[in-house]
Amino acid sequence: MLVSGLVAGFIVGLAAGGHWRNLERLDLKLWPALFVGAAARVVAPFLGDLALASSIAGLVLMSLVALANRALPGALLIAAGSLLNAGVISINGGMPIDPGALAASGKPAPADGLHMILGPETRLPFLADILLVPVINNIYSVGDVVLAIGGFWMAFRLLKRR
């Protein structure tokens, strides 16, 4: 969700008169850790037994980078969203996904080693993947939404700054 929020923020920021040149002054601290964290999240579904650890490590790294760059607009939201997702995944041994939302989406349950069906034993179910977005037919968590808002706000404000 972070990437989609960033992309939307760039598009809206440019459409609202923002300039790419504003990014020249961006001093992103710990940027290599951001790439490692993002890569850990991307490859996690393909890592079998290491999928869960890779996903959590990626979220924690992204949160640390966001905290190191907390002066940037949206960075604290990115940190919060990452930690919300890392927390619910850690506590449950995977990201719980609402079976009702899954049925409404028409998608099969993910078999990626990261997701599990939400049930009565699920802890913090309100932080699980429970939000079905019909237009794109995907299911998101509160942490995903917070991440997307933070990414949007960061990209938009960076392009629009004077």
Image (tube, rainbow, N blue to C red):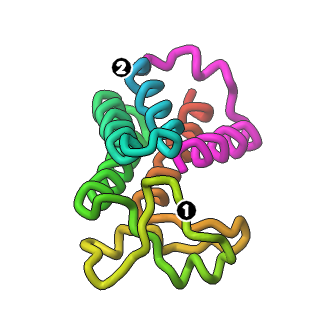
Q: Residues within 10 Å of mark 2 (few under 14, many from 20)?
A: some
The region drawn magenta spans 1-27
Instruction: Say if 119 sits above or below 93 in the image.
Output: below
User: What's the residue at 61%, 35% (across, down)?
Assistant: 160
Residue 90: x and y, percent? 26, 55
| Residue 145 in sight | yes
Residue 128: numbered disc: none
Check if residue 109 falls in the magenta segment: no
Rounded to the nearest angstrom, the CA distance separating label 1 from label 2 is 32 Å
Q: Main secondary structure of the magenta part?
A: helix
The answer to the question of whether label 1 and label 2 lie on touching residues, with beta carbons closer than 8 A, is no
**Which secondary structure, mark 2?**
loop
Q: Amino acid at mark 2?
A: Leu
Q: Which residue is mark 2?
A: 30
Q: Which residue, given by chain and number where applicable, does mark 1 sit on?
A: 110
Residue at point 51%, 45% (across, down): 45
